[in-house]
Amino acid sequence: MKRYKDLSPPPRTIMTPGPVEVDPRVLRAMSMPILGQFDPAFTDIMNETMEMLRELYITDNQWAFPVDGTSRSGLEAIMVSLIEPGDKVLVPIYGRFGHLLTEIAERCGADVVTIETEWGTVFDPQTVQQAILQHRPTIVAMVHGETSTGCMQPLAEIGHFCREHDVLFIVDAVATIGGVPFYTDEWKVDAVMGGTQKCLSVPSGMAPITYNDRVERKIQNRKSIERGLRPVGDIPSAVLSGHHRIASNYFDLAQLQDYWSPKRLNHHTEATSMLYGLREGLRILLEEGLEARFARHAENGAAIVAGIRGMGLELFGDDAARLPVVTCIYIPAGVDGESVRSMLLHDFGIEIASSFGPLQGKIWRIGSMGYSSSRKNVLHVLGALEAVLIHHGVSLPAGQGVQAALRVYAGQKEVTYQ
Ligand SMILES: Cc1ncc(COP(=O)(O)O)c(C=O)c1O
């Protein structure tokens, strides 16, 4: 009989855009004994998690809870519950995950309109505003931080414009939540979908979401009409059509919110250990403090940028749109990008990411998220990358990458090498 060894994952420094390293406190929390999902000791944990998610999302929304599944389960839950066949949905695309939003909206039967900007750039908010006026969508769906391009879209202006024009604004904040400021209420975002495996530093397997009463009304009206009831309340015109049944049971937010409400209506079997992990991840985040956490991510991102420039490499993407938690670097001409990644992994125990679609084989992506976003990790990855590149025959100013990063940590001005 074949014998299987004890599980023993090799130690790794994970500098990718996720999944990233997890705080040992989260791993410990996940090994706690299982509770029944209607046990008051467990429902207290659910309530505390909701409270902490409201702090994370900087919102007064009643609804803030995780969907069980990877991050796209949050996207699907919001979109399948909200979008009715024929709804016009505008998706401004500036990378791979805009295409994912488009695909999900299409599967929901939406009349999808897309606008695109070159990968490595983001939209001028006015371009999105013009598209809203031209196409008159019910919903605008956008990505806040594009892990595929290392760019971040400013949202406040677009959010305010959507609210003024009675459009629902839904945002994929999977890459940014917990690492970069995100002001749900202030930016007038109606629904936000986050991820656990990135800046929250919890394993993949839950998708924390939040949404406001505008979103809830549309979902509840679909439910009311499905049950042959009249729509309730004062419904914004953008929200009223509601005659198509929500096409998923698993992702039906009307049912999920009943489960997360004091009614505790049975829906799915809760992923108990994941919830323990998320609760601990949020507790760690709030102990650190949102501002301090954002500052840590910004500093480590700046140190990577300085380090990469210090070693004479070229960054991909518009400087003004840089996502602080994912840095994209052109692979130098003549260098086998996969061979570099493989040597980093096998000789140094460090993982960095390759890329997708049009950028495949052209750039590497270095993540600096959550527990992985540390000075130690940044200095290790820069030092190791220099060594591996020299080994691959690249001529670069040896030592300068790490020195440039050290200057950032010393509070000195970044030195750039063109
Ligand atoms: C911006 C963004 N959105 C959505 C997703 C999808 O997340 P998942 O693969 O966990 O379903 C990812 C994953 O990397 C992402 O980076």
Image (cartoon, grey):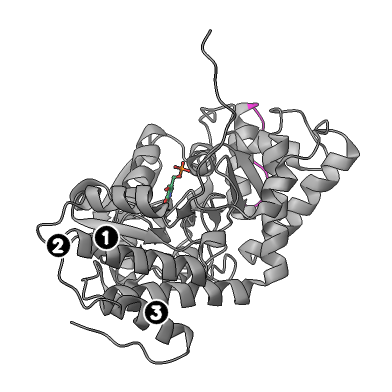
Q: Residue at x 35, y 87 (%)?
A: 414
Residue type at numbered disc 2 = Gly
Q: Is residue 124 visible?
A: yes
Percent x, y for residue 92? 32, 56
Local crowd size for mark 3, using a 10 Å CA cut-off: few (<14), some (14–19), many (≥20)? many
Percent x, y for residue 398? 25, 76
Disc on the earlier residue, 1 or 3: 1
Residue type at numbered disc 1 = Val
Q: Residue at x 74, y 41 (%)?
A: 260
Local crowd size for mark 1, using a 10 Å CA cut-off: few (<14), some (14–19), many (≥20)? many
Disc on the earlier residue, 2 or 3: 2
Residue type at numbered disc 3 = Ala
Residue 353 located left or right of residue 46: left
Residue 118 located left or right of residue 299: left
Local crowd size for mark 2, using a 10 Å CA cut-off: few (<14), some (14–19), many (≥20)? few
Q: Mark 3 falls on what kind of element?
A: helix
From the image, state whether disc 2 or disc 3 is nearer to you. 2
Specify the segment rendered in magenta. Answer: 227-234
Disc on the earlier residue, 2 or 1: 1
Residue with the mark numbered 1: 388
Main SS of the magenta segment?
A: loop
Percent x, y for residue 413? 38, 92
Under 8 Å from ligand 1: the CB of mark 1? no
The correct choice, above or below, for 71 with respect to 39 in the image is below
Question: Residue 12 or 189: which is nearer the viewer?
Answer: 12
Q: Residue at x 41, y 70 (%)?
A: 154
Question: Residue 342 or 172: which is nearer the viewer?
Answer: 342
Residue with the mark numbered 3: 405
Which quadrant holds residue 275? top right
38 inside magenta stretch: no
The residues tagged by marks 1 and 3 sit, at their Cα atoms, a distance apart of: 18 Å
